[in-house]
Every structure is written in C-alpha cells, then in structure tokens.
Amino acid sequence: RERIHPKRDIAEAVPDFFPHPYYQVFEEKQGFQPNLSIVDLLFNMGPEGLLVLRDSIRETGR
C-alpha cells in the first residue's frame, strides 16, 4: 500500500515497472502519456488492460 504514492516517482517505488504503450484517444495530438491512471487504461483497453499491465512488468533475476 505504501509503495505507490502520487507525489513520488513511480520508477523509484517500483523499479521493475515500465509502462507499455496502449491506445489513448488523444495520442495523435499529445503522444502516449504514461502513468495517467488505471481508469484511463480500463476505459481505453477494457479487459485487455490486464495484458498491458502484464507486459509493463519486466522480470528481474529473482
């Protein structure tokens, strides 16, 4: 619960997370905007949002 905080950089909190691009409505004008919100991901991708999240986590040699 404490790993993600709106004022901290997500890269520091979760170093294995690299946002995978997905369809966004205004992507042509503004380019892909990573880390907007889970609501943006769900509204734009629906159930396929789970695949985007899965592809955004890079495995490290644990």
Image (cartoon, grey):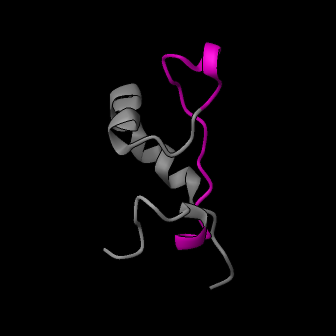
Horizontal relation, residue 29 to residue 24: left or right:
right
Quadrant housing residue 15: bottom right
Out of 21 and 50, give the one closest to the viewer. Answer: 21
For image coordinates 35% across by 76% down, the residue present is: 2
Residue 33: give x, y in percent of width and height: 57, 34
Residue 6: give x, y in percent of width and height: 41, 58
Q: Is residue 42 magenta?
A: no
Image quarter where the C terminus lies is bottom right
Residue 31: give x, y in percent of width and height: 65, 25
For image coordinates 42% across by 74% down, the residue present is: 3
Q: Is residue 21 magenta?
A: yes
Residue extending farthest to the front is: 7
Horizontal relation, residue 43 to residue 59: left or right:
left
Residue extending farthest to the bottom is: 62
Tell me if residue 3 comes above or below residue 24 in the rendering: below
Quadrant housing residue 17: bottom right
Out of 55 and 1, give the one closest to the viewer. Answer: 1
For image coordinates 60% across by 44% down, the residue present is: 20
Residue 29: give x, y in percent of width and height: 62, 14
Horizontal relation, residue 26 to residue 58: left or right:
left
Magenta part of the chain: 12-32
Residue extending farthest to the right is: 61
Out of 34 and 47, give the one closest to the viewer. Answer: 34
Image quarter where the N terminus lies is bottom left
Tell me if residue 43 comes above or below residue 56 in the rendering: above
Q: What's the magenta bit mostly, secondary-structure-wise?
A: loop
For image coordinates 47% across by 45% down, the residue present is: 51
